[in-house]
Amino acid sequence: MLTSAHAVMTKAMKKLTFILLLLVSIAQAQPNITQMEYFIGTDPGFSSAMQITGFTSQPDINNFINSITPSLNPGINYLGYRSKDANNVWSHTNFLTLYVVDSTQRKIAEVEYFWDVDSGFNAHSDTLFANPIADITNGILYADVPINLGLGTHILFARSKDTKGRWSHTNYVDSVIVTATAISEFINQTGINVYPNPFSDNITIEPNNNETLRVTVYTIEGKKVMDKVINQTSKLETQTLSSGAYILSIVTDKKRIYRTTIIKD
């Protein structure tokens, strides 16, 4: 019985050895790749696509992709590639989806901002922000503060557009508090000195510890007649202003907006 089992096992091992030798023989007989081609988008048919040169029997797909990337358009590209062996037998067509990002650097052409409510792209102010170099992280000092912006807390948002017309994300800049105070209490509440009042040919603004201020003067009707950014004691010329009451708005880098009434003789 042992002799019979040994014979069966020996026969099976011979068959297995024969199969392995056959597989090795077949593997060695595989013909080399003689042609590779690819297409972008629509398949033009076998042997009609763009030729891939410099490939090996097992080409590096990453090197291949890098070699054709410059010819792809920004956005989504559908890429197909295949190979043919020495027996003129084509492989299956392999597909890749490539997303190409336009990474070219563009200059900021426009910055816009809004308070509290977004009315959509290209729908907001860009007065002093029209200077692309303006630092929008300090936007509170450059954004126009509407005279009708009510007392209390408000939120400023900003975004930019480059020379290719691409908008950035909308960015939160700051939350600020708008406060109104009498001119007689102004220095006590703000640390900013404004004099004289009433004034005639000029009015002097003294920042607290040389902090940066945005100083805006409006008529009682809300027309802007003066707008400056200062960081030291400054004398504002007012000869051209008519006699009467004006609204002085001072924006500080401490995220506060102060309003008071000043009088020209």
Image: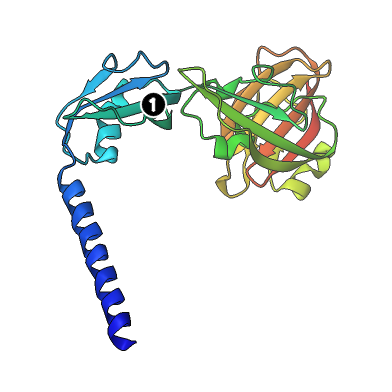
Residue under the point 42% across and 18% down: 41
Residue topped by disc 1: 79
Q: Quadrant of the N terminus?
A: bottom left
Q: Quadrant of residue 88?
A: top left
Q: Label 1, secondary structure: give it.
A: strand
The front one of 88 and 152 is: 88
The front one of 138 and 252 is: 138
Q: Quadrant of residue 242?
A: top right
Is the residue marked by circle 1 packed among few (<14), some (14-19), or many (20+) residues within 10 Å? Answer: some
The front one of 38 and 74 is: 38
Residue under the point 22% across and 39% down: 59
Q: Amino acid at mark 1?
A: Leu
Query: Is 153 displayed left or right of 131 in the figure?
Result: right
Query: Is 237 displayed left or right of 53 in the figure?
Result: right
Q: Position of residue 218 (x, y in %)?
A: 75, 21
Q: Position of residue 243 (x, y in %)?
A: 78, 15
Q: Quadrant of the C terminus?
A: top right
Q: Considering only vertical position in the picture, is 74 above or below 173?
A: above
